[in-house]
Amino acid sequence: MNDIIVFDIETKNFFTDEGVGWDNFDALQISVVSFYSYNLNQYFCFEENELKDMVDFFRSGKSLVGFSINRYDIPVLNIYFQKMNLKPRMNLWQKERIDLLEEVEKIAGQRISLSKLSEVNLGEKKEHSGKEAPLLYASGQIDELKKYCLKDVELTKKLFDLYLNQKQLILPDKKTGQRII
């Protein structure tokens, strides 16, 4: 029950898709969930039809870490867990959550993408954007989608580790890329 889980989800669709609408989390369909378990020192990736196999990992997590998890990942995944009718029930909102985007916003006063944060702090950029995830799914590029999702988890974990070790991150301006903190 003391694990820290760093995670990311990708969906088959998005709020801007026809028939979905903003904040309609019930209409979003998960394609893959990737995560890292500190206790096991291992990365995992599950497709939608395998989500029941990952429930115990999230159940054992004391803390959930991610990038924009409070706005996207947790609402979507929590709905899936509620629909699974788990015994005992699991509510991800009751877990300790560290949302790196929210922490960055508090300090910088602006949203800064995972790609920009990673580039400035780790020297690595993302290869795809979140908008591409539904397209990768629709075109059947599941292995590429999993690779993309796992990379987001890896970058988030590295940023989290860096923050834990140095107690700070370099924060670039989202438009200019110039260091603001």
Image: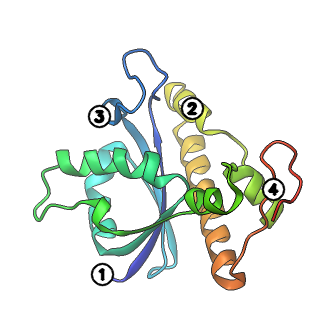
Q: Secondary structure at mark 1?
A: loop
Q: Earlier in the sequence, mark 4 or mark 3?
A: 3
* Viewer-proximal residue among 35 and 97: 97
Residue beneath disc 2: 136
Residue 172 marker:
4
Residue 1 marker:
1
Q: Residue at x 66, y 39 (%)?
A: 129
Relative vertical location of residue 169 with respect to residue 124 in this rendering, above or below = below
Residue type beneath disc 3: Asp
Residue beneath disc 3: 26
Give the mark toward the camera: 2 or 1: 1
Relative vertical location of residue 52 with respect to residue 175 in this rendering, above or below = below
CA distance for labels 4 and 3: 34 Å
CA distance for labels 2 and 1: 34 Å
Q: Quadrant of residue 87?
A: bottom left
Q: Earlier in the sequence, mark 1 or mark 4?
A: 1
